[in-house]
């Protein structure tokens, strides 16, 4: 984890906890020539734009008051909801997603595929089981957690 992400996480955590929001993720990434500091927050029932703006204002004030500046380059601050396809990062995220339709991307292919979508049937610290549809049949597939590069909620079409 970069020092920027660690610093921002420590600054924003008490802000979101003050309103009983959940800090989903903090990322600091370069896209093209610009840097983006993204803070994803959520709460039961969803987060709205006014709540995102409030967190953004509070965090901006804290960042501006630090000397030396922990982020010397210019950047854009974005505070938002993780959206309908929220990433699954923490164990609590997986617990909430049990029975839900999710998407996983793998480091190493399984059956010549690196991406799968299905219903999260179960998981533990070592494995994750999805109920997937292959052509006209449903099948349970189990994946090693160490092989999962990314996991997120998915919208089923």
Image (tube, rainbow, N blue to C red):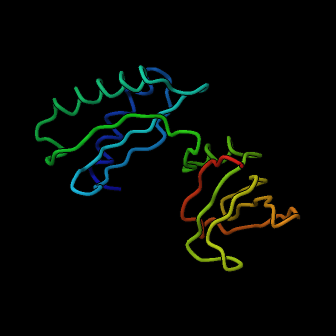
Total numbered circles: 0
Q: Which picture quadrant has residue 66?
A: top left
| Left or right: 27, with 148 as reference point | left
**Of 124 and 54, which appears nearest the observer?**
54
**Position above or below: 124 against 50:** below
Query: In x, y percent, where is residue 21?
Result: 49, 27
Residue drawn 16% across the image and 29% down it: 65
| Left or right: 71, with 58 as reference point | left
Q: Which picture quadrant has residue 104?
A: bottom right
Query: In x, y percent, where is residue 68?
Result: 11, 41
Residue drawn 59% across the image and 77% down it: 108
| Left or right: 38, with 140 as reference point | left
Locate the N terminus by quadrant. bottom left
**Position above or below: 156 against 106:** above
Q: Residue farthest to the right?
A: 137
Query: In x, y percent, where is residue 146?
Result: 59, 68
Residue drawn 31% across the image and 34% down it: 11
Q: Residue farthest to the bottom?
A: 112
**Position above or below: 129 against 99:** below
**Position above or below: 46 against 121:** above
């Amino acid at each position: 984890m970069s020092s920027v992400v660690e610093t921002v996480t420590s600054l924003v955590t008490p802000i979101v906890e003050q309103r009983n929001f959940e800090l989903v993720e903090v990322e600091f990434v370069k896209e093209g020539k610009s840097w983006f500091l993204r803070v994803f927050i959520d709460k039961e029932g969803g987060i709205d734009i006014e709540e995102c703006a409030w967190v953004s204002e509070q965090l901006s004030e804290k960042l501006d008051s630090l000397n030396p500046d922990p982020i010397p380059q210019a950047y854009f601050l974005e505070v938002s909801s993780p959206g309908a396809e929220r990433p699954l990062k923490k164990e609590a995220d997986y617990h909430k997603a049990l029975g839900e339709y999710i998407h996983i991307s793998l480091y190493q292919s399984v059956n010549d595929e690196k991406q799968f979508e299905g219903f999260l049937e179960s998981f533990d610290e070592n494995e994750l089981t999805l109920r997937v549809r292959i052509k006209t049949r449903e099948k349970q597939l189990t994946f090693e957690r160490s092989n999962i590069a990314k996991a997120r909620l998915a919208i089923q079409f």
